[in-house]
Amino acid sequence: MAEQWTLADQAANPDPEMGLRSVRALRDLAERLEVLQVANARRSGWSWQEIANVLRVTRQAVHKKHRDIG
């Protein structure tokens, strides 16, 4: 878990290459966590609308992105 704090610190680095690489790594981490938590929500019986509400996106958007989860 300490890695994300290092990435967050590096994302604020004045060196654009280091900062942008860190931003990319944080995006990748957020994407993996979203997939994990959407799968958890679906296994727990959440509807696509409930998930969309928490993520602040439309039901259609979350379903299109994660429909293979179930």
Image: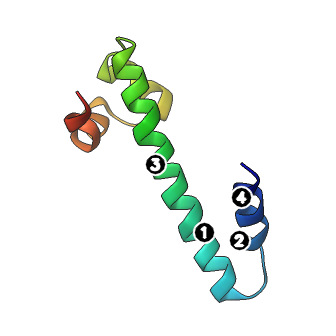
Q: CA distance from mark 3 to mark 2?
A: 19 Å
Give the x, y percent position of residue 18: 68, 83
Q: Is residue 8 above or below residue 55?
A: below
Q: In front here: 60 or 47?
A: 47
Q: Is residue 39 left or right of residue 31?
A: left
Q: Secondary structure at mark 4?
A: helix
Q: What's the residue at 30%, 23% (across, down)?
A: 48
> Residue 52, image x and y in percent?
39, 29
Residue 61, labelled with which disc? Answer: none
Upstream in sequence: badge 2 or badge 1 = 2
Label located before the other in sequence (1 or 4)? 4
Residue 56 visible in the current orientation: no
Viewer-nearest of discs 4 and 2: 4
Amino acid under label 4?
A: Glu
Residue type pointed to by label 1: Val
Image marks 4 and 3: residues in contact by CB distance under 8 Å: no
Task: Give the labeled residue for mark 1.
Answer: 23
The residue at the point 70 percent across, 65 percent down is: 7
Q: Residue at x 63, y 87 (%)?
A: 17
Marks 4 and 3, how far apart in space?
15 Å
How far apart marks 3 and 1 lie (CA) works out to: 14 Å
Residue located beneath label 4 in the image = 3
For the residues bearing labels 2 and 1, Cβ distance under 8 angstroms: yes
**Residue type marked 2:** Ala
**Foreground mark, 3 or 2?**
3
Kindly state the secondary structure of the residue where label 1 is placed: helix
The residue where tag 3 is placed is 32
Q: Earlier in the sequence, mark 3 or mark 1?
A: 1
Lower position in the chain sequence, tag 3 or tag 2: 2
